[in-house]
Image (tube, helix red, strand yellow):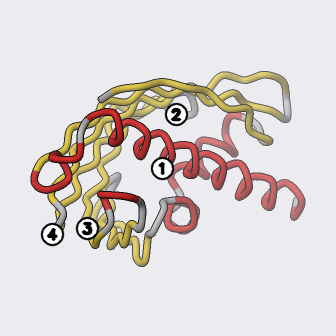
């Protein structure tokens, strides 16, 4: 399963990039994230409880950031495992300055699932993946709006 998209965010390149790497922001934006901490530089561990369709369940996830080119791009590699099965995903994030106060975030992703989750069919999984991704970026936008109001 794969996809792509983009979203306009309030904040300059540096602010958006640093927010995307902030563990507290990530915790607030990842659907069902109960706990998230930095295990080492650019590696996070998360405890997720996802309540969407057939992917419902608890997952232990490792999130690895690679190919960092601050403040323009990075790659996000996720491995999650739980009773419903496993998820492996990779996303490329590219930030483009729109003006001094706005940034466009462009993303592409590929994901694979296994275990019980894989039995529900690609069509439904694709819909669930899009829902989770859109929810994440909607929350990122909200977090950046809060930061900009506080500035």
Q: Earlier in the sequence, mark 3 or mark 4?
A: 3
| Mark 3–mark 4 distance (CA, rounded to whole Å) | 7 Å
> Residue 70: x and y, percent?
52, 34
Label 4 near label 1: C-beta < 8 Å?
A: no
Left or right of 54 on screen, residue 74? right
Q: Which label's residue is closer to the chain start, 2 or 3?
A: 3
Q: Find numbered disc 2 in the image and state the secondary structure of the residue it sits on.
A: loop
Residue at figure coordinates x 85%, y 29% from the top left: 100
Q: Is residue 29 above or below residue 99?
A: below
Residue farthest toward the left in the current orientation of the protein: 115
Q: In what quadrant of the picture does the N terminus appear?
A: top left
CA separation in Å, label 1 and label 4? 19 Å
Q: Is residue 133 above or below residue 29?
A: above
**Residue underneath mark 4:** 83
**Structural distance between the alpha carbons of marks 2 and 3:** 29 Å
Mark 2 or 3, closer to the camera: 3
Pick whichever of labels 4 and 2 is earlier in the sequence.
2
Dot label at residue 132: 1
Q: Secondary structure at mark 4?
A: loop
- Mark 4 neighbour class, 10 Å CA radius: few under 14, some 14 to 19, many 20 or more: some
Residue tagged 2:
70
- Mark 2–mark 1 distance (CA, rounded to whole Å): 25 Å
Q: Nearer the viewer, residue 6 or 37?
A: 6
Total numbered labels:
4
Observer-side mark, 3 or 4, equals 4
Which residue is label 3 attached to? 59
Whole-Å distance between the Cαs marked 3 and 1?
14 Å
Tell me if 115 is positioned left or right of 135 in this view: left
Identified at 66% across, 43% down, the residue is 16
Q: Quadrant of the C terminus?
A: bottom right
- Give the secondary structure at mark 3: strand
């Amino acid at each position: 399963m794969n996809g792509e998209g983009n979203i306009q965010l309030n904040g300059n390149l540096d602010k958006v990039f640093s927010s995307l790497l902030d563990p507290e922001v990530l915790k607030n934006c990842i659907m069902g994230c109960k706990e998230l901490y930095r295990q080492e530089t650019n590696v996070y561990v998360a405890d997720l409880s996802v309540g969407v369709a057939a992917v419902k369940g608890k997952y232990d996830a490792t999130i690895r950031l690679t190919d960092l080119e601050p403040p323009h791009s990075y790659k996000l590699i996720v491995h999650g495992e739980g009773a419903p099965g496993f998820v492996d995903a990779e996303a490329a994030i590219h930030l483009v300055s729109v003006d001094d106060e706005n940034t466009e975030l462009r993303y592409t992703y590929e994901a694979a699932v296994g275990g019980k989750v894989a039995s529900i069919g690609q069509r439904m999984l694709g819909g669930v993946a899009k829902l989770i991704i859109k929810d994440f970026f909607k929350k990122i936008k909200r977090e950046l709006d809060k930061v900009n109001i506080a500035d």
